[in-house]
Image (cartoon, coloured by chain):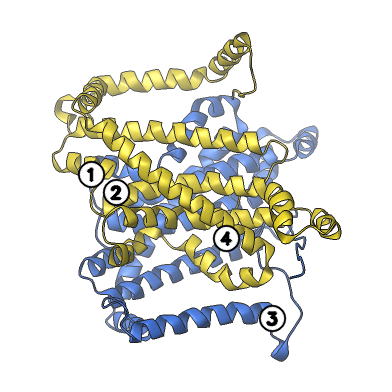
Amino acid sequence: MQPKALPRPLGGRPGVLRTRPLRWGVSSSTLRRVLSLVLVAVVWEIAGQLKIDASFPALSTAVGAWFNLIISGRLTRELMTTFLTFAAGLAIALVLGFAIGVLVGRYRWAERLLGPYIYAFMAAPTLVYVPVLVIWFGTEVASRIALVVAFAIFPIILNTIAGVRHSDANLVEMARSFQATPQQVIFKVLVPNAVPLVMAGIRVGAGRAVKGVITAEVFLTIVGLGGLIQSFGSSYRTDLLLATVGTVVVFGLVVTEVVKWIDRRLTRWSVGVSRG
Amino acid sequence: MTTTTHTKPSDRLASALQTLRDYWPFLLSLVALGVLWELNGGGTRALLLPKFSTVAAGFVEIIANGTLLPNLWLSFVDLVIGFSIAVVGGVAIGLVIGRFKVVEDCLDAYLSIGLITPIVALVPLVVIFFKYDMPARLVVIILFSMPIIALNSSAGVRGVPPSLVEMGTSFLASERDLLLKVILPGALPGIMSGIRLGFGRALLGTLVSEWLLAAYALGEMIVQMQGRNQTAQLYATVLTILVCAVLLTRLVDTVEKRLTRWKRNAAFE
């Protein structure tokens, strides 16, 4: 095989490279991507039909279960619960994370005061907060939202810090020499400048918030998609289980794509910040 | 932050003093929090927030009755084995993905799914195939940490300057030599970013597996203490896990910085 270490822009997820176009205007790369998905689907279907494992359903069975779940309205209802918890948690994480990030990034004393706490709370496996959350907030929605915040907030804090610091000293100096007030420096220079990096943090944070909400629904209250997974898992309804897991994956993909789209709209002007 | 390059004891002392000077607000707040905790805890709120001294007594108790340390060790063993497998597998997959476009095309979708899916949701499936014991726990830890290691390793491979690879090929390097002597060292910053991020996830995976499968080690401790309302011991356990996680993460961070001092590389997640 001919070595093909092609240079690519640093920063995004792989896959921006165009290979030569093939028939029907489809590149060989796209064709391979589709083929690999089809192959796994076929193997899954055959393995399921042959009943290799009694509890492992064929792809078609799982898809059928998925439609049944949708038609019964159960999936939509639980998805709504999950989405609301996710959205509330992510919103709190955004506001709180941004505020802490600006404070720590801008002021030396804040970094010296809060830096070690941020490092410590970020390093700890987030699940360790569950017992404490149960003690303080019980096992209902407040606890679940708090766990989503704990999952999502740290990338937002870190990237806001980086974004605030990344800002060009020249720009700040220029604003000052044009008599900008400290508020103006913050809101007209530092905040816009930090947007691309902050958005990158939000992208990661949103992905983690999805994991947070499912974790909360498995460990705190058995509701939402996480709750469905728990109950289908313990009753060995593998077809329904796979249908729900599939829904969670789609939910994660949609969230990621939406945040990416917002990111692109907000940071079209910026160059040189990783994107993906 | 202190660096670890000092050799003379006097230098170490100086850098320790510098850290103290830099981070006195943090240390002061730690003391203040401890005092506030002691003053406000206990009494009618004993179940919500036991006094700091009660938690300290709980810590001594779980050490003395031999629950904490053996369980901590069992969890650590799970973590080390699972994470090692994830590193080897993740780096291998990342190298192949980064090097061969065909493999990337075929595996990209699955890598994305692995990164996006909350692994907690896959635990019931793991139970079906691997039951509840150590193999199942290791699979959970691997699922948590391997995708991010593979992603960053493949990004690391792509960060290797093509001119180096071209030179290798024009000097007739075999694919094996190219991989071991050009690509692997060149991709090290990306690989180490992946290992650092993957380690955090492996920690989470360890706790998830020991809590959600058959309760085991630290997970078993937490579940039991929750059930018996042993709040002081529970706080002590949580704080111990926090401190251990910080120390281990610090260790991994230090290793990463030492190995990749020559290059800063972005991390992807």
Instruction: Check disc 1 and report its element: helix, strand or loop.
Output: helix
**Figure colour of chain A:** blue
- Nearer the camera: disc 4 or disc 1: 4
Which residue is identified by label 3?
A28
**Disc 4: CA contacts within 10 A as few (<14), some (14-19) or many (>=20):** many
Determine if residue A276 is in view.
Answer: no
The vertical placement of B106 against A49, above or below, is above
Q: CA distance from mark 4 to mark 1?
A: 34 Å
Q: Are marks 4 and 2 on the same chain?
A: yes
In the rendered image, residue A40, in percent from the top left (x then y), is placed at 48, 79
Which residue is identified by label 2?
B210
Q: Are marks 1 and 2 on the same chain?
A: yes
In the rendered image, residue B31, in percent from the top left (x then y), is placed at 39, 18
Residue type at mark 3 is: Ser
Q: Chain of mark 4?
A: B
Q: CA distance from mark 3 to mark 4?
A: 22 Å
**Disc 2: CA contacts within 10 A as few (<14), some (14-19) or many (>=20):** many
Q: In the shown orientation, is residue B175 left or right of residue A250?
A: right
- Letter of the chain shown yellow in the rendering: B
Instruction: Check disc 4 and report its element: helix, strand or loop.
Output: helix
In the rendered image, residue A101, in percent from the top left (x then y), is placed at 55, 39
The mark nearer the N terminus, 1 or 2, is 2
In the rendered image, residue A46, in percent from the top left (x then y), is placed at 40, 85
